[in-house]
Amino acid sequence: MRGEAKRDMEGVPIACDPAALTAEQRERKRSLQRLLGANLRELRELENGYAFRHSPNEIVLLALAEFVALERLCCPFFDFGIEVGRSGGPVWFRMTGEEQAKIVLEAELGISA
């Protein structure tokens, strides 16, 4: 099954398509990015992307889920992961991908490598 998923992702272009979002969705995504940026506690560079530590606040968790729902429309080449620690532990959000996905992520989020 894992091999099938990998084959399905082959050929997905590493390019964002802002036209995949409505004007309202683009504005909402920007708003979510501001909220998540303000809540960022730690940033870790990964081999194929980045991990972002956030507070375990319910608003942040909902914002992460909504951000993923929008981001995957315009950038289908990213893989997303949200890990919630037990007992109010940290929340880690990962954005990763193959090939040049990390470079696109750095440009989109204004991360200097």
Image (tube, rainbow, N blue to C red):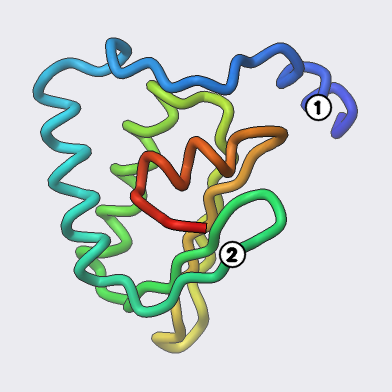
Q: In the image, residue 106 lies at what x, y percent?
A: 46, 47
Placement of 106 over or under 78, stated as above or below: below
Mark count:
2
Which sits in the foreground, 103 or 74? Answer: 103
Tell me the quarter of the image containing the N terminus. Answer: top right
Residue density around tag 2, few if under 14, some if 14–19, many if 20 or more, within 10 Å:
few
User: Secondary structure beneath disc 2?
Assistant: strand
Disc sitting over residue 45 in the figure: 2
Residue at 34% x, 50% y is: 110
Residue at 54% x, 46% y is: 80
Disc sitting over residue 108 in the figure: none
As drawn, is 71 to the left or to the right of 100? left
Placement of 47 over or under 3, stated as above or below: below
Q: In the image, residue 49 lies at what x, y percent?
A: 60, 51
User: Secondary structure beneath disc 1?
Assistant: helix
Q: In the image, residue 8 lies at what x, y percent?
A: 75, 17
Q: Amino acid at mark 1?
A: Lys
Q: CA distance from mark 2 to mark 1?
A: 23 Å
As drawn, is 95 to the left or to the right of 9? left
Q: Amino acid at mark 2?
A: Glu
Residue projecting furthest to the front: 112
Answer with the quarter of the image where residue 20 lies. Answer: top left
Of callouts 2 and 1, which one flags the residue occurring earlier in the amino acid sequence?
Answer: 1
As drawn, is 37 to the left or to the right of 96? left
Q: In the image, residue 6 lies at what x, y percent?
A: 81, 27
Which sits in the foreground, 28 or 108? Answer: 108
Q: Which residue is mark 1?
A: 6
Placement of 85 over or under 92, stated as above or below: below
Which sits in the foreground, 18 or 59? Answer: 18
Pointer 2 with pointer 1, Cβ within 8 A: no
As drawn, is 47 to the left or to the right of 38? right
